[in-house]
Image (cartoon, rainbow, N blue to C red):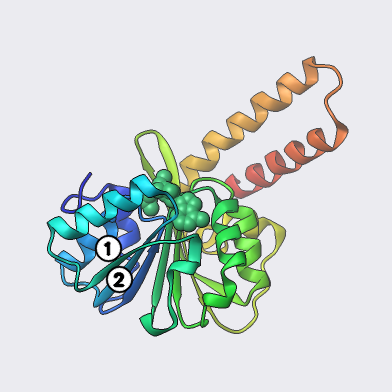
Amino acid sequence: MNEQTLSRRLERVAAHVPAGARLADIGSDHAYLPVALMRRGVIAAAVAGEVAMTPYRAAERTVRENDLEQSIDVRLANGLAAIEPGDGISAITLCGMGGETIRDILDSGKACLTGHERLILQPNGGEQPLRLWLMSHGYRIVSEEVLRENRFDYEIIVAERGDPVHYSAEQLYFGPVQMQTRSPAFLSKWQRLLRERQRTLNSFAKARNVPEHKVREITLQARWITDLLG
Ligand code: SAM
């Protein structure tokens, strides 16, 4: 992967960034996503935020080597603190981190959000707590997808501020849009996870001292997945 050839995962994230957006890519690492979008003329400007020095330097290098210092600002900052009021950010990408980490970044940086930004989130697990945060903070999930790359299932969740919305526990777990669209990638992900839950329950049955709440939790998840798959 580089700034010319994105991974399939980042290509799918890129597809949700609106044309002409002013993008903040938080946790940008090499800044491949904003640089690719700027080279393609999709976005108007970008901030690439990084909290760690090595990826920050890598992002600076990618931007410099592509002569994009005028349109992409690389900033060393924790989470949404990379965004400054004058940036006029209209889309934020947070990709390749755990869902809880993305949630924590949104929560601790919520003062930096105007509510007009489209959030394009690609959590590696922890989708349920992330969706719960979105619902609790007035965000509606407008698009979702699952994709499989290098034997990993990745989810992309796109959210925008709107009228308050209530999602059921199952919708928070599976994704409200994905439950509607039921793509082949989504169904195979949950077929795999059902087998995993069943293996876990079998091993619980043979083990001693498994906490009762753990058995209840996995049993409930297995039932939800079975119902989902019909
Ligand atoms: N977004 C890229 C992608 O999806 O390919 C890079 C993902 S990389 C696994 C995660 C990056 O997020 C790391 O470079 C890490 O330093 C950065 N990161 C983690 N927590 C962060 C935070 N609170 N603020 C800014 N960057 C953060």
Tell me which corner region of the image, top left, top right, bottom left or bottom right, holds residue 118: bottom left
Q: Is mark 1 within 8 Å of ligand 1?
A: no
Quarter occupied by the N terminus = top left
Q: Secondary structure at mark 2?
A: strand
Q: Position of residue 171 (x, y in %)?
A: 63, 60
Could you say which is closer to the camera, residue 96 or residue 218?
96
Residue 93 position (above or below residue 53): below
At horizontal 62% and vertical 66% (from top left) the residue drawn is 107
Instruction: Indicate the position of residue 181 as horizontal and vertical percent values.
Output: 47, 60
Residues 50 and 121: in front is: 50
Q: Is residue 60 above or below residue 88?
A: above
Q: Amino acid at mark 2?
A: Ala
Disc 1 + disc 2, Cβ < 8 Å: yes
**According to the image, label 1 marks what residue?**
34
As shown in the figure, which amino acid type bears the numbered disc 1? Pro
Q: CA distance from mark 1 to mark 2?
A: 6 Å
Q: With 18 as the anchor, is 26 left or right in this view? A: right
Image spot of residue 18 (x, y percent) = 31, 75
Viewer-proximal residue among 219 and 94: 94
Counting residues from the start of the chain, the first of labels 1 and 2 encountered is 1
Q: Is residue 45 left or right of residue 29?
A: left
Identify whether 216 is placed above or below 157.
Answer: above
Q: Residue at x 33, y 69 (%)?
A: 17
- 41 on left or right of 82: left
24 relative to 208 in the view: left or right: left
Q: Is any atom of residue 131 visible in this view?
A: yes
Q: Please give the name of the residue rendered at 15% of the width and 66% of the height, measured from the top-left corner.
A: 40
What residue is shown with label 2? 46
